[in-house]
Image (tube, grey):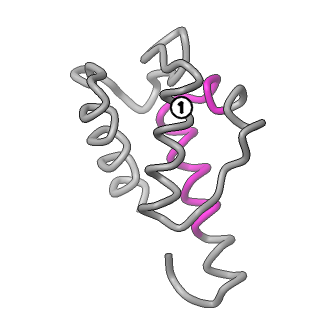
Amino acid sequence: MQDRIRAFVLSALAEMQYDVEGVTGDTDLGPAGLDLESLALADLSVQVEDEFGVKFDLDEMETTALMTLDQFTTDVEARITAATATSGSPA
């Protein structure tokens, strides 16, 4: 599942005109890596919400900016698992 999430995130970032060449799981989403600003993080979060049926709160954007790509995909996978457990159906 993490590979699918990672591929989706990288595709979404590429569509948002971010250079994803050379991005690894250890690449930070925020200033130390991809340098996603709050609007870009919000856009990415909405796309992930739509694709995987998970929810992010606006106050999480600051924390998200400090994550690496692997940490973000792990977080999304955990949200999918929690949503599936709550609803009883896969996202």
| Residue positioned 26% across, 24% down in the render | 17
| Residue positioned 53% across, 44% down in the render | 45
Most distant residue in the right direction: 59
Q: Residue 76: within the magenta?
A: yes
Please, what is the dominant secondary structure of the magenta stretch?
A: helix
| Residue positioned 26% across, 19% down in the render | 19
Q: The residue tagged with tag 1: helix, strand or loop? A: helix
Task: Choose between 38 and 32: the one closer to the eye.
Answer: 38
Most distant residue in the bottom direction: 88
Question: In the visual, does 63 lie left or right of 42?
Answer: right
Q: Report x, y in % for residue 81.
A: 61, 71
Task: Choose between 55 and 9: the one closer to the eye.
Answer: 55
Image quadrant holding the N terminus, namely bottom left
Segment colored magenta: 64-80
Question: In the visual, does 86 lie left or right of 12?
Answer: right
Task: Choose between 5 and 58: the one closer to the eye.
Answer: 58
Q: Quadrant of residue 10?
A: top left
Q: Residue 40: within the magenta?
A: no
Rendered view: 4 above or below 24: below
Q: How many marks?
A: 1
Question: Pointer 1: what residue?
Answer: 41
Q: Residues within 10 Å of mark 1 (few under 14, many from 20)?
A: many
Q: Quadrant of residue 66?
A: top right
Most distant residue in the top direction: 32
Residue type for callout 1:
Leu
| Residue positioned 59% across, 24% down in the render | 38
